[in-house]
Image: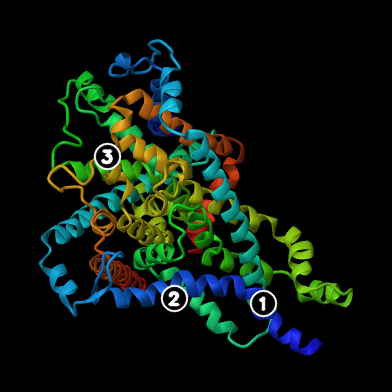
Amino acid sequence: MVRKIKKIGFYALLLLAALSFLYPFYWMILASLTPEQNIGTLGIVPQGITFEHYTGMIEKIPIWSALFNSVFVATLSTFGVIVFGSMTGYALAKMRFKGRNLLFYTIIFTMTLPFQITLIPNYILMVNFHWVDTLAALVVPSLNSAFAILLFRQAFMTIPDDLIHAAKVDGCGDLRIIFQILWPNIIPSIITVGILTFMTSWNDVLWPLIVIREEGLMTMPQLVTLFAVGGRSEAQLGVKLASAVLLALPIIIAYLFLQKYFIQSMASSGIKS
Amino acid sequence: MKKLLDRILPYLVISPYIIHLLLFVLFPVIFSFVLVFHKWNIISPMEYVGLDNFARLFADRLFWRSLWNTFIFILVHIPLQIIIALSLAYFLNKKLLMLSFFRASFFMPVVISGVVITILWQQLYGLESGVINRGLIALGLGRVEWLSNPKIAMISIAIMATWKNVGLYVILFLVGLQTVPKSYYEAAEVEGATAWQQFRYITIPAINPTMFMVVILSTIGGFSLFIEPYIMTDGGPLNSTLSAMLYIYKQAFGYYHMGYSATLSIFFALIIMAVVVVQKIFVESEEN
């Protein structure tokens, strides 16, 4: 009997916790659809539905080009991190060359370096490359990731050398071995790196704020940030929240379908770092 | 010819990373140490100023204030996060139904942009019409000046950051808890240990490595605090939410003080590394 009461207590607590995580999102989506004058009293029950915040926001800021920029930048970065990361990871795991250990420890060292050190010099680099206000400034510096290299190295190390030898006897070059023979064997690692890189890129806002000033080149989080803090939302709650909903929506949809992978990827990134 | 190709092939394979390393990691680190001795606004030529930037840093009360604020943020955020994450993980580990629903809902804010979370919580924290204050009033309690009281504003941001990140740490703790064999608890129960004793002497030691990881991860994350105060308060009221990163950002990209902001960045990075090392030493001495 005591057990049963305890169990009900656990459920009640967890349910309350789950509500406290979900309710704010419910409120945000509902508020973005509620006429401005009713948002201040909005709780759970809808108080009229309107799309005026969305149409208003779309008129005020180039949200579609920002969406395109974000997708473009995140896709290219993810692609680069997977391709280059598996190349370097493969070299570290399966190739012999002078300086291999040095490279390995350098990569680990770069991971312990707080990003604050490189932020300002990297901006100066972008100025000198004339990359300020180009998407190259967002894509090129994020084509490689130390974390991805180490993860791929680990994954390749579990693959027996015989597989590679056999492929070499058949006349396969190293790059073909990586992309055609080894990739299918490390799909979980690719998914992990893919999700983490895409999400990091999609959510990053500090670096875009630094290198992009032209509205047409901004990413979504940057555009939404400047819209929320700047004067153009005219202190209207509805349009601010509508822009936040649009920013969250792609990740929420992806999360609903790939929730298991999201959780696994993020947890493994924590454990491995 | 074939042999030579074999020798240089590994270097070709790692070349994309090497170029990245030289350009975006090593060059910036070295260039930082040049910048700290110069005054530079990018447009006019660099001017050598010796140790002036350091002298200015030590006299810059606003910078010290921003460091202090960042520490307050971390000191509220980390304990809160550990307590909530550990309790939720503890309950989730009880083999309940709907585990994946609970896990997924706790994890939801983790995947969503901090920009969204901040815009949302700025409304929730609203003085008159914010949902939280309206709830407090409905419960017969008074309203709280979440963002307008300089004594409370940073704590409010820490609460929001905890809400955003705690799901990740629930999962990490849950993984840690699942490594504890059930037989330990059964043996303890036979011996007549209370639930608290079991928690204190079986659970806590078993999740020590997880705890360490959580502290390190949230310390590093906490020091990067930027977008939340940037959107929510712009560092106010009365500079009470001005984080170190926000201050460096303003120095660098508001005033274009490149030399000075690089000095602040290096100093700040050294503090971060020192704090992490101290935490590491502390944990290692605990384990022995």
Spatial distance from mark 3 to mark 1, Cα to Cα? 47 Å
Q: Which mark is residue B26?
A: 2
Residue designated by label 3: B232
Q: Chain of mark 2?
A: B
At 51% from the left and 48% from the top, the residue drawn is: A199
Q: Residue at x 17, y 24 (%)?
A: B141
Q: Is residue B92 above or below residue A245?
A: below
**Tag nearer the camera, 2 or 3:** 2
Amino acid under disc 1 = Leu
Mark 3–mark 1 contact, CB under 8 Å? no
Percent across and percent down for residue B219 are: 33, 59
Q: Amino acid at mark 3?
A: Met
Circle 1 Cα neighbour tier, 10 Å, few/some/many (<14 / 14–19 / ≥20):
some
Which of the image's four quarters has the N terminus of chain A?
top left
Q: In this image, B214 relative to B239: left or right? A: right
Q: Residue A52: horizontal and vertical position, in percent?
A: 42, 17
